[in-house]
Image (cartoon, rainbow, N blue to C red):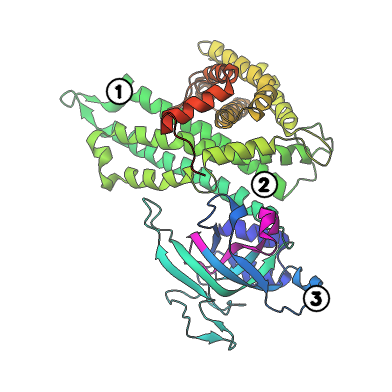
Amino acid sequence: MTDGCARVLELHGTEEMKHAVYDRLISSDPSLAFTAGQFMTERPGGSDLSLTETTARPLDANANEKELTKTGAKYLLDGFKWFSSATDSEVALALARTGDPALGTRSLSLFLLPLRLPVPTGQTPTPSGVLARRDILVDGKFPENNGITIHRLKSKIGTHSLPTAELSLTNSLAYLVGPLNGGIKTISTVLQITRVHSAFHSVGSLARCLNIARSFANVRKIEGGKRALRDVPLHVSSLARVAVTYRAILGFAFGVVHLLGQTETPSPSSSSSSSSSSSSPSIQARFRLLNPTLKAFATFHCVPAMEECMAALGGQGYMEENAIGRLIRDALVEKIWEGTENVLALDLLRASAPARSDGSEPITHWTRWAEDILEVAARKRIDGMEDGDEDVKEAIEVIRDVVKRFRWIIEVTRGNETLPRQTLLIFGHVTSAIYLLEHAVWVADNGEEDALIHFDAFARWTIEGGVAGSGLRDMVTQFERRSKSRKEKRVERDRESVFGRGVRSRL
C-alpha cells in the first residue's frame, strides 16, 4: 500500500505532496519514513465500490470550480470505512463520493488523508508511539486525530502485525488526488502494485514453507534411523510437486514485475512497432492481462502447496513453533484482499476486451509474445536431455495448442457466467509455463549446469500440474466439456446444490 500510494503521488500529486509526503513514502530512514493505508471498503458494498457512502465536500464552498477540481484541493470527508488497513500509518488513500450517488463509481474521487495533523514537513521526525488526540486542535480548526475515530480492530485469523480497523471520518481534512470524479481510474495504479505485492507474499510464504520441509527431510530418520526422509522416493515426489509449483509461480511473478518496470520506465530501445512484443502497446496490454491473473493464480496454488509442506513434517508440522501455521493463516488473506479469484477472473475478461482507442486486442499481443518464445524453444537442443526430450516437446506442443485456442476460450467465456474462474486458471497456467520455458532457454544459453532441471520443471508443470489442479491439457478438456453443457441447466443445478430445490432469492 505504501508503494502504491507513492506511485499515485508520483503520477498525480502536487509538488507540495511530493515534497511533504512522497519523499517520505520512499525513504529508508525509519525516523522520516511514512507508511500508507488504503481506505476503500465500506459496509454496503465490500468489493462493490459503487455503493460507497463516504462523502466529500469542499472546505471552501465559495471557491471557483477550477480551484475545487484541481489536485490538492482541500475537502472534508464524512463516512464509515468498514475495512481499513494499516491504521497505524501516517497517511491513507481514501475514496469518497463527490457527485450523484446514482452515478455509482463515476462520482467517486480519490483523496490523500493524513491520519494526524499537522502533517510532518521537511526533516520533522515521524510521530511514533503517541496516539493522536481529538481534544487538541491544530491551527484552531482541526483535531489532531483529523476527525478519525477507530471503533474496533478486526479480529482476523492472520496478518496480526497489520492493524485493520473499522473507523469513522468526521470532517476529516483530505486533499484531492487526480481528477474530480476520477477516483477509480486514479486508484487503479495502487491496485496494480498491491496485487503484485500480494503475489509475492504468497510465493515468499511458500518458499519458507518449502525450505522448512526440505530441511526436515534432511534430518528426519525412519526405519530405525537407517534412512532419511530425503531418500524416500514417495516423500521426495510430494515435495517435488511443491518445488515445481514454487518455480512456476516465482517465474510468473518476476515476469509480471519485469512488465511493471517497463510500464513505469519505458526503455528508449523499445520497439516502435505495435506488432512487436517489445513495443509499449504490447507491454501495457500484457501487464493489464497478467496483473489480476498473477495475484489470483498465485494464491490458488501457493496455499495448497504450503499445506503439503506442513504435512511433510508429520505431527511436527501442526505445531506453532515451526511457523508454517502462521504462514498459512497470513497467506490465506491473499484469497480475499485486492480481489477474490472470482473478482479477478471478471477483471481478466474486462482486460481482454479490444482497446477503445485503436480496437487492438490485448490477447493478440499476448499471443505474439508467447509464439516468439515457443519458436526459439522449439529449435533448442540441450546436451544430456535425451531422456526428457520427448516430454519437453510434448509440453511445447500443448502450450502451442492452448495459445492458438485461447481467443476462442475468451469468446466462449464471455457468454457463460460460470466459466471466468476456469479461464483465469488456464490463462495463468499457460503463461507461467511459458515463463518457465523462457527461463530454461536462458539458463541453457548461458551454460548453466542445471538447465535440465529447468526444462524438466517446465514439462512437469505443463503436463502434470502442481500440488493443486491438473495438467494444462486436462484443464482445457474440462473447459470444453463445461462449454458444451447447457449454461442455464448448469446454473440451476449449482443453485440447487448450494441452497436446495425451490429456494429463491429474497431480494
Q: Which residue is mark 2?
A: 261
Distance of label 1 from label 3 (alpha carbons): 76 Å
Place of residue 132 in the rendered image (x, y in percent of width and height, measured from the top left): 47, 78
Residue 247 appears in view: yes
One can see residue 450 in this view: no
Is residue 101 shown in magenta?
A: yes
Q: Count residues near mark 2 (Cα–Cα under 10 Å), then give few for <14, some for 14-19, many for 20+.
A: few
Lower sequence index among marks 1 and 2: 1
Residue type for callout 2 = Gly
Which quadrant, please, contains the N terminus? bottom right
For the residue carrying disc 1, how many other residues have a C-alpha within 10 Å: few (<14), some (14-19), or many (20+)?
few
What's the CA distance linking mark 1 and mark 2? 42 Å
Mark positioned earlier in the residue sequence (1 or 3): 3
Amino acid type, label 3: Asn
Tell me, yes or no, whether the highlighted magenta stretch contains residue 362.
Answer: no
Question: Marks 2 and 3, Cα distance to the nearest angstrom?
Answer: 39 Å
Q: Tell me where the magenta segment starts and ends, as one range.
A: 81-110
- Residue type of the residue flagged with mark 1: Asp
- For residue 226, above or below residue 280: above
Q: Does dot 2 land on a helix, a strand or a loop? A: helix
Query: Helix, strand, or loop for circle 1?
Result: helix
Counting residues from the start of the chain, the first of labels 2 and 3 encountered is 3
Q: Nearer the viewer, mark 1 or mark 2?
A: 2
The residue beneath circle 1 is 231
Q: Residue at x 47, y 33 (%)?
A: 301
Instruction: Return the x and y of residue 54 as percentages of the image width and height.
Output: 58, 64
Q: Nearer the viewer, residue 49 or 190?
A: 49
Q: Which residue is mark 3?
A: 64
Q: Quadrant of residue 433?
A: top right
Q: Contact (CB < 8 A) between labels 2 and 3?
A: no
Q: Quadrant of residue 359?
A: top right
Crowding near the residue tagged with mark 3, few <14, some 14–19, many ≥20 C-alpha atoms within 10 Å: few
